[in-house]
Amino acid sequence: MSGRGKVIGFLAAIVVVVFAVVYFGISATSNLGSGAQPLTAEEATKKLDKLYSKIKVKTPEPIKGQIDLNPVDVAESLPDIDKFPVSVKNSTPHFVEIFSSPEKAGSGVDGWLNEVATDFNKAKVTVNGKPVSVMIRSINSGTAADYIKSGKYVPDAFTPSNELWMEMIKSGGIKTERISKSLNGNVPGIVIDKGKYDELKSKYGEVNIKTVTEAIAASELSMGYTDPFASSTGLNFLVAALSAFDSKNLLSDKAVEGFEKFQANVPFLALTTLQMREAAESGRLDAFVLEYQTFFNEAELRSAYEFVPFGVRHDSPLYALGDTPALKKQILKKFADFAAQDKYQKSASKYGFNQLADYKPEAKVVNGGTISRAQKLWKDKKNGGASITAVFVTDVSGSMSGEPINRLRQSLIQGQKYLGSQNSIGLVSYSDDVTINLPIGKYDTNQQSLFVGAAENLVPEGNTATFDGIVVAMKLLQDEIAANPNTKPVIFVLSDGDTNRGSKLKDVQGLIEAFKIPIYTIGYNADIEALQKISSINEAASINADTDDVVYKIGQLLNVQM
């Protein structure tokens, strides 16, 4: 992942692996800082039973739906490209559109490429006597790759964070031509608490990707990393970790065995760097992944952590895509030369790029087919063999009528394709009361059919009892954990409005903390700050979506967590 601009962009655009949550509104006046003493397990169970007994819970007969066995249609789930605004507009009729990763096409220290492009467009550059310019669209590298590979939208050019995305695009049959190997320099790394770093160095003599993975496998280091389907740094870490176990064959039995042992001791997989940073601040993590450009610009991080580089460099290559006309190729070459000027490379250095010029990766870039298979391996092995039990809590209040409920149904039906058969799921809906539309069950073909049927038959009406829905979900999960103690519980809440009935946040906060159940939230233009607060209790993610992009975002979330 690439810096703060990318963090913000990913939160606003989002990959990726447990199923989703559609935004539920929580009153911004809710007080999370009550200062109350944590509940014991016995106290939490008694309180949960008491709250549950006050809720009117309906349990209709489950209805089966038609299962669609076709794989996820990424192009169909992606929103219109205009969801990702243009950061620099073209100034002439003859121009090229460039997708750029947000750490260089954002704002402030993350806005280097925008500044270069703006100056380029003012410089009155010509090709064959024609005035030319560039258009920059800031978009997460993983999401950009999805647009390009699916054919949903293919720009003239792409400058991702690293070459790994380009290898995957090439393997998808997309014609590419490298215009520049590097627009600026950057390096991904593992940011490790200084005290823990000293411990590792004392034991292993050297701290690098190999010794870090060994330390994690031996439960000597608690580390988190980001979604390798969406994050450049997360993808790079996955490839580097597999290479550390077997540099000759990333998918050998030796590499897979080492990865499984390593992954079983990874406590945290994050959608975003921001979510991971919050987990580190809570004391759960000794280390996490980050790009050096972000590390450079965060004085507090530099004072408390050591930076250990890994993987392939993040040097922002520039590629033309498809059958690019000669004029457009010339514009791209002129733009690359313009960016390479000393003036702009000095400004890149000022913003934190070009800092670790001497770093040379131990592993080389691998082909796109191998990378895709590595992602599949991660998907299958990321939970270390443990199963996930998820309850989807869906808002069916009256305000969800029309397009919102249609998109919610579509999100659930499409998102369920990301769920693994080793996991268990249930579905709860709420308005004035709460309905257990589908009790928790192993996600086999029968449960899949019942889940689709439950989603298809959601009908909106009434008020919004969000926290009653969460209480019922927690009760279902606690009963499941009693029968299956090794499962990992998770809740996904999907909603569009503020709670106006039933339990309040103050009633359930202590339960959420005591049971340590992560609650992922996705909302339709709701109170994002309040949603972030409820999700942050156990370091889950909160995603702001709308009817245009919620299907894609839910798919990303499920792909990471399930």
Image (tube, rainbow, N blue to C red):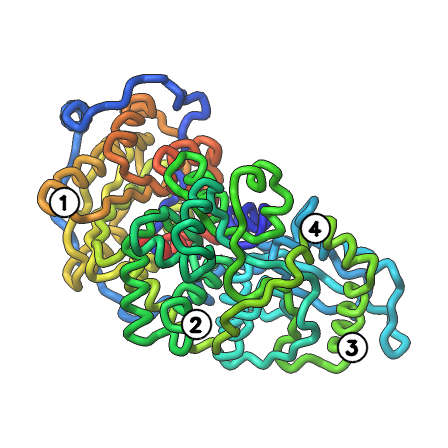
Looking at the image, which is closer to me, 1 or 292?
Answer: 292
Residue 269: x %, y % from top left: 38, 51
- Disc 2 designates what residue? 371
Residue 443: x %, y % from top left: 19, 58
Q: Earlier in the sequence, mark 4 or mark 3?
A: 4
Q: Earlier in the sequence, mark 1 or mark 4?
A: 4
How far apart in space, not on screen, are marks 3 and 1 (Cα)?
A: 62 Å
How far apart in space, not on screen, are marks 4 and 3 (Cα)?
A: 24 Å
* Neighbourhood count class around disc 2 (C-alpha, 10 Å): few under 14, some 14–19, many 20 upward: many
Q: Earlier in the sequence, mark 3 or mark 1?
A: 3
How far apart in space, not on screen, are marks 2 and 1 (Cα)?
A: 34 Å
- Quarter location, residue 68: bottom left
Looking at the image, which is closer to me, 270 or 506?
Answer: 270
Circle on res. 111? 4
Residue under the image location 48 percent in, 53 percent down = 549
- Disc 3 designates what residue? 330
Residue 339: x %, y % from top left: 77, 63
Helix, strand or loop at mark 1: loop
Residue under the image location 47 percent in, 58 percent down = 208
- Disc 1 designates what residue? 485
